[in-house]
Amino acid sequence: MKCCQCSSLAMYQVTVKNFPLCLDCYLKFSQIQQRELENHERMANFHMDEMSAVTGLPSLGPRFPARPLPVIVSGVRLNNISVNNSVVGTINTGSIGSVDQSISALVQCGAPNVAAAIKGLSEAVLQSSDLTPNQKNEIIESLSVLAKEAATPQDQRRNTVAAALLERATQITALANDVADICSKWWPVIAALFSGASNS
Ligand SMILES: [Zn+2]
């Protein structure tokens, strides 16, 4: 069964009308319900205080305690890059989201090999234990620009910018053993894209 809000597969049914919802949409739905519940709790506390104000007696009944602040893990939805939330951690999720969107664009504009290169590099870098969070952030940020440039028409690509980013990123990944295989496979694919274009 399809979700009634998007094209994903439904996993839950909600309200008396049994609307089918997928995992992501159910998450939204339950967040709204939690917020409504919280408002009811605050209203109940308010009424207790109001009664004590009217009667002049201290408010003796139990109160709903303040809710702890929500923990946002990473609100970014990824369609291509497959990584665990725990490895995303301190990495700029905006950059990861941007890389992910560019991968979709590359697939659509008929460059599946470049898309696979960007995807493979992103996943390897995010999962690497040899790279520091700062290094990962820098590479993912570079990949987000490179992926965007790769997805633009050849005559509009900023090859000089891309080449500089590429050089810096390959220098950083060269320090990490656990991404060496992936890097030797995929960096050349991206390098060829920008060097080839600058010669033409
Ligand atoms: Zn849905």
Image (cartoon, rainbow, N blue to C red):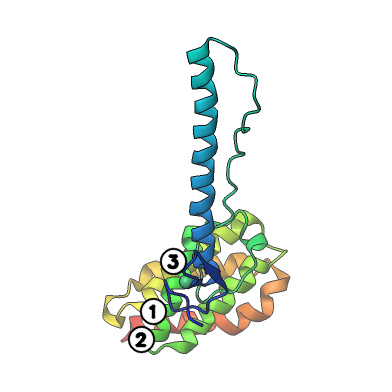
Q: Amino acid at mark 1?
A: Ala
- Tell me what residue is drawn at x 44 percent, y 66 percent: 98
- Residue 106: x and y in percent read 41, 82
Per the image, the residue denoted by label 3 is 98
Between the residue at mark 2 and the residue at mark 1, the CA separation in whole angstroms equals: 6 Å
Per the image, the residue denoted by label 1 is 105
The crowd level at tag 1 (other Cα within 10 Å; few <14, some 14-19, many 20+) is: some
- Residue 59: x and y in percent read 60, 18
- Residue 181: x and y in percent read 68, 81
| Kind of element beneath mark 2 | loop
- Tell me what residue is drawn at x 62 percent, y 70 percent: 83
| Kind of element beneath mark 1 | helix
Whether tag 3 and tag 1 are in contact, CB under 8 A, the answer is: no
Q: Amino acid at mark 3?
A: Ser
Please state, as top left, top right, bottom left or bottom right, where the C terminus lies in the image: bottom left
Residue 161 visible to an observer of this rendering: yes
The crowd level at tag 3 (other Cα within 10 Å; few <14, some 14-19, many 20+) is: some
Left or right, 79 with reference to 131: left
Between the residue at mark 2 and the residue at mark 3, the CA separation in whole angstroms equals: 16 Å
Residue 90, compared with residue 162, is above or below; it is above
Whether tag 2 and tag 1 are in contact, CB under 8 A, the answer is: yes
Numbered mark located on residue 109 in the image:
2
Mark 2 or mark 3, earlier in chain:
3
